[in-house]
Image (cartoon, grey):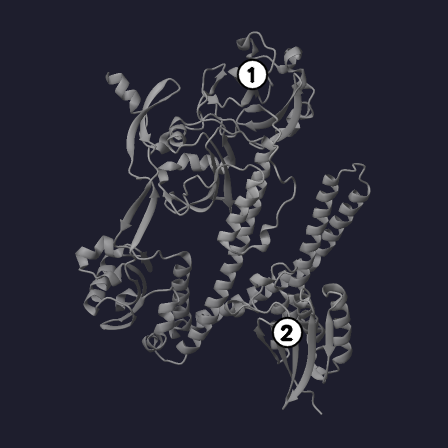
Amino acid sequence: MIDRLNSYMNFVECHDEPIHIPGSIQSFGYLIGIDAESHSITFFSRNISDIFKIGDLDGLFDRKLSDFPESFQHIIDSDIYTSLNRFTRRENETYFDKIFINDKEYHFSVFRSGGSIFLEFEEVLVNPDKRISNKYDNFYIIDDEKELWNHLLETLAKVVNYDRMMVYKFMMDGSGKVIAEKKDEEMESFLGLHYPESDIPRQARDLYLKKRKRIFSNVHTETVPVVSKTNKNIDLSFSASRGMSPVHRQYLINSGVSSSFSVSIIIDNYLWGLVTCQNIEPKHVDLEDRVQAGIFTALAANAYSSFKSKKELNYRLEVNEKLSELKTKFLKHHNLFDSLVESKPDIKNLPEADGLAIFSDENIITEGITPAIDEIKRIGQWALENTTDRIYVDRSFLRNHGEELNLSENAAGIIIYFIERDKNEMLIWFRKEFDEHINWAGNPEKKIAVFSQNGKEKQMVSPRTSFRIFTENIKGYSKRWNSRNVSAVQAVRDLILETSHKNYNVIKRLNDELKKVNEELDSFSYTISHDLGTPLTVMKLNAQMLLGNLTDDSEKSKTKINTIIEEIDNMAEMMKDVLQLSRAKHSDIQLESLTTLNTIYKISENAKMTYGSPKSEIIIKECPDVMADKTLLHQVFLNIINNAVKYSSHKDQPKVEIEGTEDGQTIIYRISDNGIGIPEEEKHKMFKIFNRMDNAKKFKGNGVGLSIVHRIMKRIGGNVDYESNNEGTSFILTFKKPYI
């Protein structure tokens, strides 16, 4: 009895379960392992005799496949096997082929792991319901998270089509949340539900990072043992048919499904989440379809990473603008306290806080929603005695210290920045208590049960038997301080250091160095955009030659090469835009009186041919001379007129009007169109680099043109503005009037 209890206690927590060595594979797969050096057989799954003519399985050990030509001739003759050493140089990289065994076609996969080469087989299945082949949707035109993940599920449904398909996002603590869902009508919805960390424990998350596609075809079938010469369990981390964890198997059964398929969502080499698919009935998906699902998921992950980076860049630019305004206010005063007091609304809002307290020795000035002064004093004293970091962040301060410090709900979350501890100078940002509740998919409380694995009974965390919504109310917390909020506080810290009189000389030197670095960065941007043009041209020429020399008449090959050429053109266009943006900032300018009519006429004619429709009409009225640089002026009109023609081209009667007028010492050009207009809620980002309006996504472009125009007009002493409504847009260009 004691021995049995000891065996139960081999592991209790889910994260201790050795799921990478289950000792078996699923019944759809067949596995042979050979030594990487000698190529002799060292392990195999017991079911290989189902597809290969083998008498004595145990007689395979320490023999080569070539010793059994009658059994393994199909493998021996395959290209992937004859080039085995070349194909298996890289660890854990899988290579694919197809072979016929006894008149049936099988997928043949090869990869190297540790000192072994894995040969894995599964039968090729034809998917009659598949509605898409190699048409890779453009995820990059979507910059809304919810829309992107829903689009991914819609796309995957055309390939694998499970009863329920979800996008599952991992939280910082390892728990997860369903953020997108596509399901059959009769299936219960899990959208918005949270799942505890133990559902996908640490070692499972590690495996999802290594092996990014995972299928369980039928949870009700027995697995197939993998036997080895040494009787040691083989590490099956990278095997497509790796056997199931008994806990996960029971979890799926409890949730009422018989099959599951998942694809890892990897962002910046981090397991961001999973596409998780479930089916009521057993379901196996062909290997090619699983690979294609992985490609679509990777494209969506890259698109998500791209637009998140753009949004982060825009956020940082906005913060920099606000900090620039703050700096101006700070420099008006001779002491820091006065600077902080005048700017307290802006300082409060930068990290999106509800309130702010400014400490300076015995003085406390507040802004917004804050605790009472006595509470703030207690918090400040606690911070001086119990923290050592320059910046302290806590969203559960009320929960952890509310009783001890007699706090109100307005002190649920705090960020403290210590300006000078010795002088009791600090800034404290506050957030009030957030009445938070989490809907869990079943009660997340852990329960222990006994499971059998490899013939041994183990006591482990039991999966939930019910997934009915369980609501947990959380008290004592504020809304989470995110990385942006902390970065904003750090920016305030840097601003205080920069404008502090005692640091003036140090900061001036650092500013000079930063200016030099920025100049070098701009120079690098110019150089890299210019110099990469040559290799791109070579790549395009080679692709075009390959297309012309194709002996294969299949549309599939032509489509793939044409896709390569199209992407090269897109990249070249983006680099051209970056190059023009750099030129707009750094090129030498020569202001002179310029006649614009001929330039505008030529640009307009080209724009009609390139971007317009047969009905496009461009009306050119008065075009007075302006003071500008000839090259930069051409760039301004080129971008504005091209946009006007392009964004009005889908109208029934597309029309563009161009007119210049004199106004005192300025010349004002108005370029108007009856196109798509600019939504009011997006006008704030018109001149941001790489930003495009939602209603412009169906038109080709990179969102750089207006940034170029904005930069040029500033350099030549002019200005660009716009007016827009549902009936079109007017861009207003203001130039200096030429000297008479």
Residue 200: which quarter of the image?
top left
Q: Position of residue 385 (x, y in %)?
A: 22, 58
Residue 510 visible in the current orientation = no
Assign the C terminus to one quadrant of the image. Answer: bottom right
Side of 271 relative to 421 (left or right): right
Residue 127: which quarter of the image?
top right
Assign the N terminus to one quadrant of the image. Answer: top left
Residue type beneath disc 1: Ile
Work out whether 105 lies above or below 202: above
Element assignment for label 2: helix
Measure the C-alpha gap from mark 2 to mark 1. Answer: 70 Å
Q: Position of residue 677 (x, y in %)?
A: 59, 69
Q: Position of residue 533 (x, y in %)?
A: 72, 56
Pointer 1: what residue?
Answer: 48
Pointer 2: what residue?
Answer: 712
Towards the viewer: 421 or 582: 582
Side of 307 relative to 461 (left or right): right
Q: What mark, if any, has residue 571 been given in the picture?
A: none
Which of marks 1 and 2 precedes in the sequence? 1
Which residue is at 64% across, 11% downward? 68
Residue type beneath disc 2: Ile
Which residue is at 62% across, 64% downward? 704
Instruction: Identify the residue at the far top of this view.
Output: 55
Side of 149 relative to 736 (left or right): left
The local crowd at label 2, few if under 14, some if 14 to 19, many if 20 or more residues have their Cα within 10 Å, is: many
Residue 469 visible in the current orientation = yes
Work out whether 228 lies above or below 575: above
The local crowd at label 1, few if under 14, some if 14 to 19, many if 20 or more residues have their Cα within 10 Å, is: some
**Label 2 vs label 1, nearer the camera:** 1
Element assignment for label 1: helix
